[in-house]
Image (spheres, coloured by chain):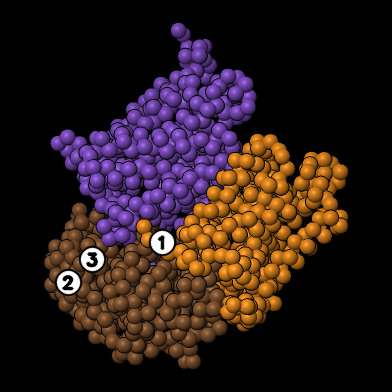
Amino acid sequence: MARAGTNLRTSYLESNEVLRRPYQKLMVAIILAAAIGLPTSSSDYFLHLVNLCLLACVGALGLMILTGFCGQISLGHAAFLAIGAFTTVILTVHLKMPFIVVVPAAAVSGAIVGFIVGLPSLRFRGVYLAISTLAMHYAIIFLCTSYQAKFGTSASAGITISDPIIGPFRLRGEYAWYYFLLALLTLVTTGCVNLVRTRPGRAWMAIRDRDIAAEALGINLTRYKLSAFMLSATLASVSGSLAAYYSNVVTVEGYTLDLAVIYVAMIIVGGMGSILGGLLGAIFITLLPYGIDNVFEFLPRAWRFGSTVFGVQVGAVGVCIILFLLLEPKGLAEVWRRTETYFDRWPFRYRPLDTTRR
Amino acid sequence: MKKLSLRRGATAAAIIACFAGFSAAQGQETYKIGYITDLSGPLAGSYTPTWEGFELYIKALNDRGGINGKKIDVVLDDDGLKADRAVAAAKKQTERDQVVGIFGLSLSSTQGPVYAEMRKIGVPVVTTFSGIGDALPPAQPFSYSTGVVFEIAGEAIGELAQNIKKGGKVVGMTFDSVGGRAAIAHNKKAVEASGGTWDEVIFPIATSDFTPFAQAVAEKKPDIVVGHYGSGQNLGVIPALRRSGYNGPYVVASYGVTEDTVRQAAQRAGSGDNIYYVTRYSSAFDKNPSVAEVADAQKKYGTSKPFSSMHVTGWALGKFAEAALKGCGWPCTREKLDMMIQTLKVDMAGLTGGPIEMSATDHYGPSYWRLYAWDAKDNTMEPKGAWVKKSSQGFK
Amino acid sequence: MVRAEADPSACFPERTVSVEFIATVVILTCTYALLAAGIVILYKAGRVVNFAHGEIAIVGGYVFYSSGLMFGGSPWFAILGAIVFSIVMGAFIYATMMRRVVGEPFYVAILITVGIAIVLKSAIIVIWHAEQVTIDIGVAPAVRLAGGATLSYMDLASIVLTVAFFVALYLFLTFTRLGVQFRGTAENPLLASQRGVNVNLVLSLAWIIAVLAATLSGVLYGGRAFLGTASVSIGLAGLTAALVGGLDSLRGAVVGAFIVALAQYLTVRLIDPVLSEALPFLILLVVMSIRPWGLFGTVEELDRV
């Protein structure tokens, strides 16, 4: 069917398209090509940071769906990551299972835990739900601590696991991990984008906006709330499992409440309610401390370590949360959209009537 | 509109500044080593003096002319007590700054991942302050430690407590962490092996008031109480114990607890009697000439923290690093340094009870521990008994 | 798993209900009650659940410590410093941040307090170098109790000050004009502003009082335990106490604090000390399942939270 200009749609099918305009498709192609070519021109250190970002993205997408799309506040994300990591440890150390079995198993255990943690959401909302997820966090971390105390080699060292082996390949080194994580993230992102623009996504968004009305419209709250929790936990669990393989060591001390808050910061900074926001937020928050480190390197040495200016890195995440909430509540995704529309409409300033902007 | 574009310009500049520094550093004719520790996180109060001790030694060494005429250049990075940042800093130091070895590190939970990553590249890592099992025999390659391993500390404290009262009832306290529980388990072993009885109270990490736990301990009528935790907890527990009516001996296990903390705790408790202190490296009040040397260096170069056994710990690591680099020669590569460390037997001259020795399978060596008694009248510490030697065998 | 061995002869009843027991529970209740009161005030006034309360308390404690230190250990300057801090911090938080998110969904205000919490935690590191400090004014054992235990002057002061605070708050809310305006704004801000109440003033005042309560509890905590970046978790305990008692009831704050304190103490002495951290959450989950709005809270649509 003929297109009625770049801003207007003539069918629901068109409005549901992910990449509407030709330049968007081109841009995605360029980004993918750049992503594939990235390792050839980067240092090992930079690739390491990129890998950390990719891992964070997977986890952040889970939380974005739960909080950004479905509106359920959850402070238990660190616990889900821990579940993934410890499932990996138990299966590799005790049952000697290979990578291909362990990661899906971690996903399944994440789903189960997500189901359990999601049950209070049927009864509570808002801050009460946040507190109950917090309680679950402590419970899960307690279990993990007990496990590590019992089975850790030298108790304080954590548990070591060896590199994953997929068929004839050994997943070791930044290059290999980068491509693996890139492929995984592409898959996960595509899946999430599709979920969000079809029925589950719309149901979640309805629940977020006004769940009583959603129920009145016939949306099964139980089913969609629980599925949001399960999906979020599954993605976090997979991310945690892969992170465990990536760093070869698992310690429970790394899974603190602060980590859960950092993931919440990722989705705030990225912009709640947008998949692109989840990715941008994850990248931004992950790279923030290293970026600040770089800025500090310009200061003379005596300055840096005499005072504890370093403490600023800890506060930077908090400052970002506050600034974004006050000045840019829709996050980095909104910044992106604004840039996009600026170039799209140029040289015009204002947009023509368009009711299906997303 | 102008305000908006100003805001955007500022944001863009900030983002560019963040990425500007990702370029390689210049190289000179120096020995380059890396030091990563917690300078900004929750335990910066303990790790900063350890770093300062190390820095003092290196400064003094460079002023003497360095090693073989070449100075030591230390690349310092902060890990904020997070394993991710420690690993990233290690990768940056080995790749960009081309360090031959990494020293220091922080909390035991950050050490495992750094050891694992550096093992892949083949860079020797020597930790201090804490130590983990990777360094204990049979040791993992490239992983060394001159710090305090919880299990060994627990046993050493159990043995040293016998100097206070033989065969009595010892109650151990710690907070609910993996390291604390490990220390307690080994403390129990040592106490029961020397004929004493054991009981314990473990409290949560986040606690609002130490009084209930202190009361639980006092109720058990112990002969000696041992505390396996850091400064803050000691400051809270010691007064709480005295308030609950327990005025017997209390042993501070030095996981980064400084002498100043002991003084403050004694003051808060109203009396400094019966407080003891166990440490691997000499206390700042020890009258040994090596300790005086560290004190002199501190006065000469200045540090931000008051002089404590943490500075002595860092200084000892500096001494170890000098011996390693000296033996490595020039040019020093990572493999050479690694091989060199395995052959080291460095005389500590009173900084601890004996030399630090490493071997191909034992990357920790025998450790020496001492008990000090706090003297409330002069606000100093006196050693009580001789150094106890603990072998590193049998902990894995 | 290693745990404390329970000594059967030390169970009950004569040992447990000693003067020492009562004193400890009362003092613990005071700590939690002050924290809970601050949270309740903020919720009543602005419908904001403050996740930064623990951090504010600890930073307030540090300010008290530093003010005292700056003028040679004098407690009066310390108190002055703490009061100035409360006024400045409370007004600042309200004016720059809370006021601007008035119309937004509930989670925005909560997330801003989360951001404030992180920034305050980093302030402890940057300004005070994350040193673990204690408040040493009057903490030496002073009053002897039956059974060998002692209380310090600070212990006594904490009880007195908490009672004084609640009494003062009650008098303020009931008998002063500003207090009545406060209650009016809490019930219906729009109507109150249309009746001429300066809502901004009232809400800033709410924040100032809350920060003052938090600072007081931080100082008392610094006297009994220590101030450090790890200490900020008392905020969660206070939040739990407030939720148990009902987020908009001051009476509930005291009762909730007492329940949590008593339960924690009994857990430590009779069951297993390690569980005392998780216990407040357990109590909260139980209370929430039966009566989601807290023991004394107004029965309301949970949607508002």
Q: Disc 1 or disc 3, which is closer to the eye?
A: 1
Is mark 2 in CB contact (under 8 Å) with mark 1? no
Q: Disc 2 or disc 3, which is closer to the eye?
A: 3
Residue C123, image x and y in percent?
54, 62
- Extreme top residue here? A1
Residue B66, image x and y in percent?
23, 78
Residue B396 appears left or right of C293: left
**Amino acid type, label 1:** Arg
Residue A212, image x and y in percent?
63, 27
Chain C tint in image: orange
Tell me which chain the residue with mark 3 is part of.
B
Q: Is residue A253 visible?
A: yes
| Quadrant in the rendering for residue C105 | top right
Task: Give me the residue at 79% from left, 58% from top.
Answer: C170
Q: Name the residue under label 1.
A: C3
Considering the numbered disc 2 on the image, is that residue within a helix, a strand or a loop? loop
Tell me which chain the residue with mark 2 is part of.
B
Q: Quadrant of the N terminus of chain B?
A: top right
Q: Mark 2 points at which residue?
A: B358
Chain A tint in image: purple
Q: Residue B395 carries which label?
A: 3
Considering the numbered disc 1 on the image, is that residue within a helix, a strand or a loop? loop
Q: Is residue A22 above or below residue C76?
A: above
Q: Nearer the viewer, residue A335 or A212?
A: A212
